[in-house]
Image (cartoon, rainbow, N blue to C red):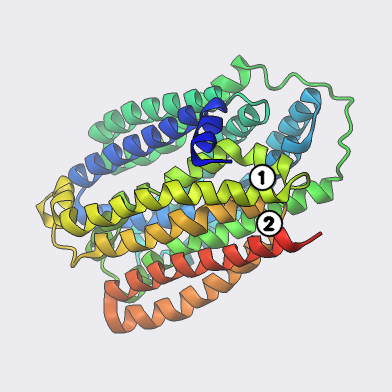
Amino acid sequence: MSTVNFIQSFLQRKGGYVVFSSYFAKLITFIIAVYIIRFIPKAEYGFIVYASTIISFIAPFKGLGIHQGLLRFGSISKSQQLKKYYLNQTLKKGLLYTLLIIGALCAITPLLSSNMEDAFLYIILLSFQLVSLLLLEIIKIYSRLIHLNKLYSNITIYNNIFLLIGVIGATYLWGALGYIVSLISIPTIYSLFLIFKLRLLNYNKNLTAPESNKSFLSYGFYMSLGGMLSQLLYAVDVILIGNLIKDAEIIAQYKTSNIIPFSLLILPVAILTNDFVKITNEADKDKRSIWHYYLNYLKIMSVICLGILGTFYFFSQEILLIFGKEYSNDNNLMFIFSVGVVGALLFRIPLGNILSAIGWPKINALFSVIVLLINIVAGYYCVINYGVMGAAYTTVFLMWFSGILSLFALLKFLKTE
């Protein structure tokens, strides 16, 4: 398939809507971040960043990953009724597992906040965000399963519009607490509205799934384990800085420097989100088509990456002024992060998603364990000896290293009979 045909095929699957909605969501997230950074004191923002980093690490494991099983087994199912059955089972069990996770998280919060005591309340409150994230994610997955990528996009867009309005209003009235509460309540209310509007609870209760609960949960567990451990790549550095340097303002500066570069990671996520079901269906039929798919992706993304590196090399200091003058001196952290982002755009994210689509979640989990161990050991050493710059260099190296591991795994898959 030529690059032109690749793009045309992607657009026919409503991929343009998915990419637009994903970047729209990132734009709203960016606007909210700028507003919060300017409205909330720097130290208090640092505590929120610390708390949200912990939650973002746990978030892939919400519902013990059962929603990932919905995506995998729903993709290969030909029955619309069965897909809806999977949806309802995922809702019931996912909510139960998520509440158990929240309880466990609340129990260990005193330990997690021992070196940053003011983050205690934020960790407790933000833990309930796992419920809203799970509900919305399940609904969006179902829309992909029934090939309504435009509906998926609309859900993303409207949720973020409501979130923007709610966050600005609540933060203006109640400060940081209003910001936290709006993050939890707005997606939850919108998700409940969608569940009833789309009549998602109406399904054939007499159906029996051809897959065992064990295989369903096993796939989701390993997918989420890999996702959770993978998320640590973006969390270990902040946690180490918080516990070793113990300065909320330094955390705020570090986080601010990577907000814009890391927001670009949504592009491969959007592309693979749109095509996940397609890749899953082709995995057993035509392995070479998956390799050609990746090569076409690589051609397009390589050009984009050159533009990213050039932009952050020449304009990073000017870009940081968006957040205020106190954030403008970051010792070139933003450009350093952009180098890591290129590795993630070319290898880490697309290949990780492809491995999940072909049914290799255990490999992703294994790679994530390897990267996590390196991250903890190298990150600790580098933060102790080089401060935030050491943390940044460790993160960038691992963004490339993990991507190369995934590339070797895909090549191995292509050689298997």
Asked if residue 108 is positioned above or below residue 283 in the image, the reply reads: below
Asked if residue 408 is positioned above or below residue 138 in the image, the reply reads: below
Q: Which mark, by number, is residue 68?
A: 1
- The image position of residue 83, as x and y in percent, is 75, 29
Q: Are marks 1 and 2 in contact (CB under 8 Å)?
A: yes
**Residue at horizontal 51%, vertical 29%?**
11
What is the distance, in whole Å, between disc 1 and disc 2 at their CAs?
10 Å
Disc nearest the viewer among 1 and 2: 2
The foreground one among 124 and 48 is 48
Asked whether residue 94 appears in the rendered view, the answer is no
> Which quadrant of the structure image shows residue 162?
top left
The foreground one among 63 and 336 is 336
**Is 326 on the left-hand or right-hand side of 197?**
left
- Residue tagged 2: 361
The foreground one among 141 and 307 is 307
Look at the numbered disc 1 and give the secondary structure of its residue: helix
**Residue at horizontal 56%, vertical 62%?**
229
Extreme residue toward the front, this view? 2
Query: Local crowd at mark 2 within 10 Å, few (<14), some, or many (≥20)?
Result: many
**Is 390 on the left-hand or right-hand side of 10?**
left
**Residue at horizontal 83%, vertical 21%?**
204
Look at the numbered disc 2 and give the secondary structure of its residue: helix
**Is 384 on the left-hand or right-hand side of 73?**
left
Q: Quadrant of the C terminus?
A: bottom right
- The image position of residue 268, as x and y in percent, is 48, 46
- Three-letter amino acid code at disc 2? Pro
Looking at marks 1 and 2 on the same chain, the residue that comes earlier in the sequence is marked by: 1
- The image position of residue 177, as x and y in percent, is 33, 41
Query: Local crowd at mark 1 within 10 Å, few (<14), some, or many (≥20)?
Result: many
Asked whether residue 331 appears in the rendered view, the answer is yes
